Amino acid sequence: MLCPKCVKQIPDGSRFCDQCGLRLEATSRPGTVEDEKEMTILSFVNFKGGVGKTATAVNVASDLAKYHEAKTLLVDLDPQSNTSMWVMTAEKLKNRMDNEKTCTVYQLFRDHTLGTHDFDFDEAVVKSPVQNPDGTPLIPNLDLLPATYDMVKLEHEIATSDLPDRFSILEKELQVARREYKYIVIDCAPNIYWATRNALFFSDFYIVPVIPDYLAQSGLQILAQEVRKYLDIVAHHKRNLVKLSGVLMTRVDKRSVDQRLQKGYIENALRELKSQGTVDVRARIFATDIRNSIKVQESIARFLPLCEYDSNHPVAEDFRLFTDELVRAVGQK
Ligand SMILES: Nc1ncnc2c1ncn2[C@@H]1O[C@H](COP(=O)(O)OP(=O)(O)O)[C@@H](O)[C@H]1O
Ligand SMILES: [Mg+2]
């Protein structure tokens, strides 16, 4: 039969199009997709830097892979490449930047802006990058699609490209991931320019990590409104648009009276956004807070997620509990 999306021939019995990765619906091929996993795509988004997007993306992806035994792909969409450095080590990331330039998320986008075909998903994905010093995998279920610093040029390239489908490049290119992964976790840069817009278009849910301070409530309102405006523009291209799953408090000091007060203001801001119809009515402030702990910085310096660096530490427990809560929240799609 022919693929309904790219119109290429699909071999008999196959559940995917080899060309574009489209998964065939049960109706078009009865009896062949019942064991197929449903993939959930999660993006961590905030205008602000330093709020724990990367720390949350890395630790949630690791906990999904380790404790939920879910095949998980972590995608780094930030030119700062902090996620990539954290899980694959600075040395290996530098090697990729110097010697395997086409094996990064930047090339995925560049193929569209330049009209080239140099990105290959299977070559670009780093399999089980969290490893012992001897190279044995510590979290076999966790893979990474890395970013490199040269991605800093991407926004200008997309903005000046005039590509009609520039918001859906990531979605098109990562359809192939449906074969293998239960979750895709995307770490976004601190903006909602084109890379983040691509993440939002592709995602089922976005999560906003915030530090509960005075700036967080207005930041949340502006972000949610900007995301809404963008989604209104692309709404006719997709049936199920991304929903706000919730707001996660990070770097929390449980003794701080002011942070408790600010959390209350953020709750009010979210209530208002829901009543205006700006975000999904089921969006929540997650019950789990991520405490402030030096262990986070220590684990980065060892190139390990917390579940491998110090799994019994309370901040590792926070991420584990948050991951459980998130799985329950997004399970009710
Ligand atoms: N729970 C935490 N406790 C202590 N430090 C943290 C915590 N979360 C993040 N950090 C630190 O804060 C800085 C910014 O965090 P990061 O996750 O990179 O934020 P973002 O991705 O939003 O810019 C990093 O130096 C990181 O080590
Ligand atoms: Mg970051």
Image: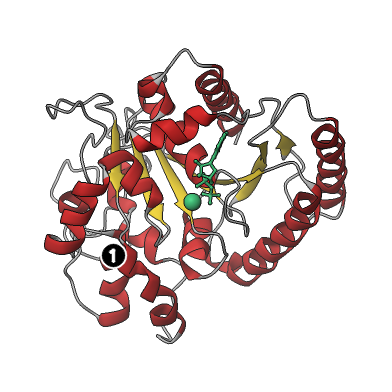
Q: Nearer the viewer, residue 178 or 187?
A: 187
Q: Which quadrant holds residue 210?
A: top right
- State the quadrant of the C terminus: top right
Residue with the mark numbered 1: 108
Element assignment for label 1:
helix
At horizontal 81% and vertical 45% (from top left) the residue drawn is 270
Give left or right: position of 22 versus 152.
left
Q: Residues within 10 Å of mark 1 (few under 14, many from 20)?
A: many
At horizontal 74% and vertical 41% (from top left) the residue drawn is 212
Q: Is residue 321 above or below residue 206?
A: above
Q: Nearer the viewer, residue 240 or 270?
A: 270
Q: Farthest residue toward the top?
A: 312
At horizontal 63% and vertical 48% (from top left) the residue drawn is 243
Q: Nearer the viewer, residue 87 or 299?
A: 299
Q: Is residue 63 above or below residue 234?
A: above
Q: How many labels sit on residues?
A: 1
